[in-house]
């Protein structure tokens, strides 16, 4: 658990480049939906922004930060 965990949220985004999901290691391709972990308070900077594919977010919803659209 990190120091800023309670400030974390997930935001749905569209991938602009290919990258690996940090949970399942599947590649999210350009143009696909994914979820990016962000800090709710803009004054707090998160150096380790995580990116998850939507399958993982659906599967692990209860353990991940809340989704804010
Ligand atoms: Zn995944």
Image (cartoon, grey):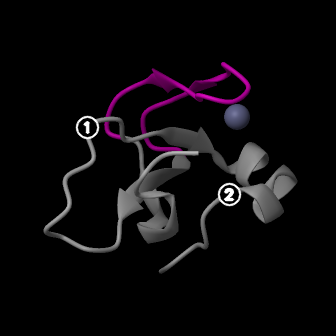
Task: Judge: label 2 CB < 8 Å from ligand 1.
Answer: no
Q: Nearer the viewer, residue 55 or 60?
A: 60
- Is residue 43 rendered to the left or right of residue 25? left
- Is residue 16 rendered to the left or right of residue 61? left
**Magenta segment range?**
16-32
Q: Characterize the magenta stretch by its predominant secondary structure.
A: loop
Mark 1 or 2, nearer chain start: 1
User: Which residue is drawn at the image coordinates 35% and 35% (left, top)?
Assistant: 48
x, y percent for residue 12: 49, 63
Mark 2, residues whose alpha carbon is within 10 Å: few (<14), some, or many (≥20)?
some
25 w.r.t. 50: above or below? above
x, y percent for residue 26: 68, 21
Whether residue 25 is in magenta: the answer is yes
Read off the residue under disc 1: 47
34 w.r.t. 29: above or below? below
Tag count in the figure?
Answer: 2
Whether residue 23 is in magenta: the answer is yes
User: Which residue is drawn at the image coordinates 68% and 30% (left, top)?
Assistant: 23
User: Which residue is drawn at the image coordinates 47% and 80% (left, top)?
Assistant: 69
Residue at disc 2, secondary structure = loop
Q: Which mark is residue 64?
A: 2
63 w.r.t. 15: above or below? below
Residue extending furthest toward the left: 43
Query: Which corner quadrant holds the N terminus?
Result: top right
| Disc 1 from disc 2: Cα separation | 18 Å
x, y percent for residue 40: 34, 73
x, y percent for residue 31: 44, 43
Evaluate if marks 1 and 2 touch, with contact meaning CB atoms under 8 Å apart.
no
Residue extending furthest toward the right: 59
Split into quadrants, the picture shows ligand 1 in the one at top right
- Is residue 34 rendered to the left or right of residue 19? right
């Amino acid at each position: 658990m990190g120091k800023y965990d309670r400030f974390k949220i997930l935001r749905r985004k569209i991938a602009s480049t290919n990258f690996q999901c940090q949970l399942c290691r599947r590649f999210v391709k350009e143009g696909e939906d994914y979820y990016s972990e962000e800090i709710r308070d803009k004054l707090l900077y998160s150096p380790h922004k995580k990116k998850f594919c939507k399958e993982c977010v659906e599967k692990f919803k209860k353990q991940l930060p809340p989704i804010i659209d």
